[in-house]
Image (spheres, rainbow, N blue to C red):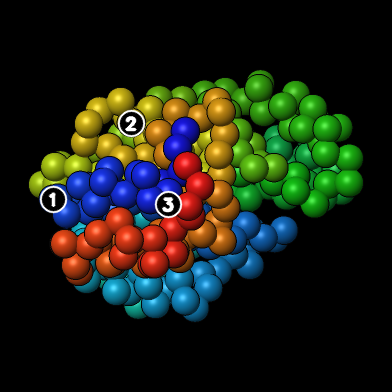
Amino acid sequence: MRNILSVRNFPVLRRFALGNVLLAFDFDGTLAPVTPVPGRATLQRRTRNLLQELAHQYPCIVVSGRSRSDVLQRLQGIDFREVIGNHGIEPWDTSRAVAKAVRTWLPVLGAKLGSIPGVIVEDKTFSVSVHYRKALHKRKAVRAILRVTRNLPGACLVGGKQVINIVFRGAPDKGLAVEKERKKWRCEKVIFIGDDETDESVFALAQRDRFLTIRVGSKRASLARFYIRSQREIDTLLRVLLAARNTPGTSPRAFKSAGPSPRH
């Protein structure tokens, strides 16, 4: 993985930014900082302002593990072309069969995990997230969660940052969702920024020349080609994308002054 905010990688970012490109973002841990209580995640004001500008320069979408209605509420006032929820399921594959499967899982999860301190079962209608960020004994909590969730009929588990996501087997993922949106908006290329295991289905598309994949935080096992060091650098990346779009002749020196890291 290479630091996308390094001056050395400026030509790659500029080439994508000046093309017919779709910008796609995860929400938690990417656009918004991760919080101990998932419901309190929010955009910083400066990030919101940058996104408002960016949405006028590029077609932009958000692809989140949250329910679509949840993310829409947090992104009010920003002209995203689409907001996709439940790891790629909403708004297209919201079948009754998937919702019914989730309803059969919830009583089991509540009965067997509800008594574990710090474990939160989040019902998202078309998927479930079991958070253990606040659990005092995290390893013990994870073992208990896996023991229960592995036996749920039709369930597929996807890990995350102190969360285990449960989706219906065969449900669309973020990779399929982003590719669908690329075709919908007739974009030749995609810049995708994400931070979690559920984003790996998009990072897997990095081998295709039309995808520039950027992970928040370097991770050797990730399929993303580039990274930014932490969520705190998201505003720098957004400013660089704005500068690249507004000033096509931007030089590496100007790119550096916009805030990228000198590191490789």
Task: Determine the CA span between mark 1 and mark 3.
Answer: 21 Å
Task: Determine the CA span between mark 1 and mark 2.
Answer: 17 Å
Question: Which element type, helix, strand or loop, lies under badge 1?
Answer: loop
- In front: 171, or 12? 12
According to the picture, the residue beneath numbered tag 1 turns out to be 20
According to the picture, the residue beneath numbered tag 2 turns out to be 206
Measured as percent of width and height from the top left, residue 71 is found at: 45, 61
In the image, what residue type sits under mark 3?
Answer: Leu
Measured as percent of width and height from the top left, residue 14 is found at: 24, 51
Q: Is residue 134 left or right of residue 252?
A: right
Measured as percent of width and height from the top left, residue 76 is found at: 39, 74
Q: Is residue 99 left or right of residue 11?
A: right
Question: Which element type, helix, strand or loop, lies under badge 3?
Answer: loop
Q: Which mark is residue 131?
A: none
Quarter location, residue 141: top right
Kindly identify the residue that appears in the image at 38 percent across and 50 percent down. 7
Kindly identify the residue that appears in the image at 30 percent across and 56 percent down. 252
According to the picture, the residue beneath numbered tag 3 turns out to be 5
